Image (cartoon, rainbow, N blue to C red):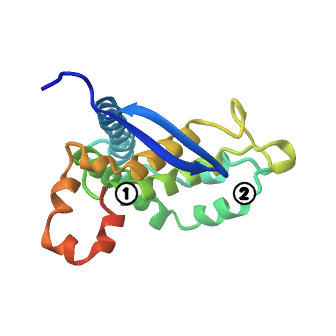
């Protein structure tokens, strides 16, 4: 038995061009596991900080209202949408807090990773669009540049974790996919992986 990393190749079409490249399956698995754990930490920490912002005696003191009413630039093309959300903080706040905690836990234990990645990507899309300082004609400026900020990077990382099915690597998704429920309902594989 060789101690050499398992090599594989990807053959696909991307933007009309045939692409082929080799990669190490071992190092891909390590990198996906590492990215999944890091993204789990990002979400879990953010959610828990919000949950306990008021301390243990006053959980869920955090509110999105201040951010939504004061931090969104008026030049942001979605300014009106975020002002609308500010009026529903009783719904938005628990969705953000508990959404982040559940996304973090799902990524951490590797269960329903594709679904968690999708929900995280949706949340990151909202955070990213909230950071726009202007619209298309201004180049969608964000605080430290144009177009790309950390929320956009997280969005792409979550897309990759879902696309590769990172929950199968030291996660419960690999076990769940072998159950009779999933075998009899193949559509559930779109949530797992």
Left or right: 101, with 131 as reference point: left
Q: Secondary structure at mark 2?
A: helix
Residue at (79, 46) in percent of width and height: 134
Circle 1 sits in a helix, a strand or a loop, which is it? helix
Label 2 to label 1: alpha-carbon separation? 30 Å
Estimate the x, y position of residue 57 in percent, counting from the top left: 26, 47
Q: Residue furthest top?
A: 3
Residue situated in front as seen by the camera: 22 or 137: 22
Identify the residue position indicated by label 2 in the image.
79
Horizontal side of 189 relative to 85 (left or right) equals: left
Residue 107 placed where, x, y %? 30, 47
Residue 114 circle label: 1
Whether 190 is drawn above or below 136: the answer is below
Which one is nearer the viewer's eye here, 115 or 95? 115
Q: Residue at x 62, y 36 (%)?
A: 149
Residue shown at 65% from the left, 53% from the top: 69
| Residue 50, label in figure | none
Inspect this view and state whether residue 83 appears: yes
Dot 2 surroundings within 10 Å: few (below 14), some, or many (20 or more)? some
Q: Are marks 2 and 1 in contact (CB under 8 Å)?
A: no
* Mark found first going from the N terminus, 2 or 1: 2
């Amino acid at each position: 038995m060789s101690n050499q990393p398992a090599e594989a190749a990807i053959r696909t079409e991307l933007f009309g061009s045939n692409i082929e490249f080799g990669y190490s399956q071992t190092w891909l698995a390590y990198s996906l596991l590492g990215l999944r754990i890091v993204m789990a930490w990002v979400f879990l920490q953010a959610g828990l900080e919000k949950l306990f912002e008021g301390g243990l005696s006053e959980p869920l003191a955090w509110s999105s209202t201040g951010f939504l009413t004061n931090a969104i630039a008026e030049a942001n093309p979605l300014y009106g949408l975020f002002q609308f959300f500010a009026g529903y903080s009783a719904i938005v706040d628990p969705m953000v807090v508990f959404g982040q905690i559940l996304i973090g836990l799902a990524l951490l234990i590797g269960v329903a990773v594709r679904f968690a990645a999708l929900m995280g990507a949706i949340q990151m899309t909202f955070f990213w669009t909230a950071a726009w300082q202007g619209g298309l004609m201004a180049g969608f400026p964000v605080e430290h540049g144009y177009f790309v900020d950390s929320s956009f990077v997280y969005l792409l990382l979550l897309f990759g974790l879902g696309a590769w099915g990172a929950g199968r690597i030291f996660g419960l998704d690999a076990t769940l996919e072998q159950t009779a429920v999933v075998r009899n309902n193949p559509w559930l594989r779109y949530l797992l992986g």
